[in-house]
Image (tube, rainbow, N blue to C red):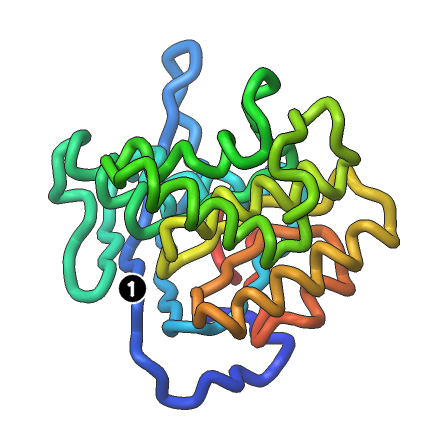
Amino acid sequence: MTDISKQDNTGNGKKIIQIENLYKDYVLNGKTINVLQNIDVEFIEGEKVAITGKSGAGKSTFMHVLGTLDRPTKGNVTFEGCNVFEKNNKQLATYRNNTIGFVFQFHYLLPDFTAIENVEIPMKIAGLSQAETRQRATDILEQVELGHRLNHKPGELSGGEQQRVAIARALVMNPKILLADEPTGNLDAQTSAGIHDLLENLNTVYNTTLIVVTHNAGLAERMDRTLTMVNGTIS
C-alpha cells in the first residue's frame, strides 16, 4: 500500500501508467541482490508525484525501470494499456524519445554544443526537420527563460541555467511523462526554488505527469502525493 502524505488532487483522472508485481534483481559475484520487490503502483495523467526514501532504497533503479532504461526481472509496466517491455530494444528507444523526458541530478549536457544544440538532440533523433527542430528548441528555451542564452555552451552557463537547458531538452518532444531524479541535488537553495517553480509550472502548462525522486522536503510537499520507498518496496 502506498504512503500518501498529501491528498491526491487529480480526481478520477486517466490512468497513464500501471505497474504490477515489479521486481529487479542484479547478480554480483554470484549472489543475487533484490533491488526492487513486489511493487504495485499507478500514476494518473498530469499528476505530480514525489518518491522519497533513504539512499539505497531503490529509488533510482525504480526510475530507470519506469523510464525503460533498464528491464525488470519480473512484472509489468503498462503505459496507456500497452505493456512497454513487450517491445524490442529499438522500439523501446523510440518510445522513450517520444514519450518520456528525463532530468537527472547531473545535467549531462554535451559540453561542445550550445544550449540550443543540446535541446535539439531528441528532435534530430526523431528525424524532425531542421526548421522545426530549431523553432521548437528556441520556443522551449524561451519558456524556461533562456532565450538570451541560446548560443552559450554549458561552460558559459550557471548551474541553474544548465539544469534549465536539461529541462528544456527533456520537454521539447512534448513527453507525457517527465522523470526527474534529484533535479536540484547540486544546486543552492535559491536556485533550487527556481527549478521547483519551473517544474511545477511546466507540469501545469503541458499536463505532463511529473515523477520526482527527491530528498528535498519542500519539493515533495509541492507534489500531489508522496510515495516512500523502503528496501526496494513502496511501503
Position of residue 146 measured from the top left corner of the image (x, y, whole percent): 67, 47
- Tell me: 100 left or right of 50: left
Q: Depth check: give the residue in front, 176 or 3.
A: 176
Mark yes or no: residue 73 visible: no
Position of residue 19 measured from the top left corner of the image (x, y, whole percent): 31, 59
Residue depicted at x 43% and y 16%: 28
Residue 36 drawn above or below residue 49: above
Q: Depth check: give the residue in front, 96 or 162.
A: 162
Q: Depth check: give the residue in front, 95 or 173.
A: 173
Q: Residue furthest front?
A: 131
Residue 216 drawn above or below residue 166: below
* Rendering quarter of residue 79: bottom left
* Rendering quarter of residue 212: bottom right
Mark yes or no: residue 6 visible: yes
- Tell me: 133 left or right of 152: left
Position of residue 217 measured from the top left corner of the image (x, y, whole percent): 76, 61
Position of residue 14 measured from the top left corner of the image (x, y, whole percent): 30, 79
Residue depicted at x 22% and y 39%: 94
Disc 1: which residue:
18
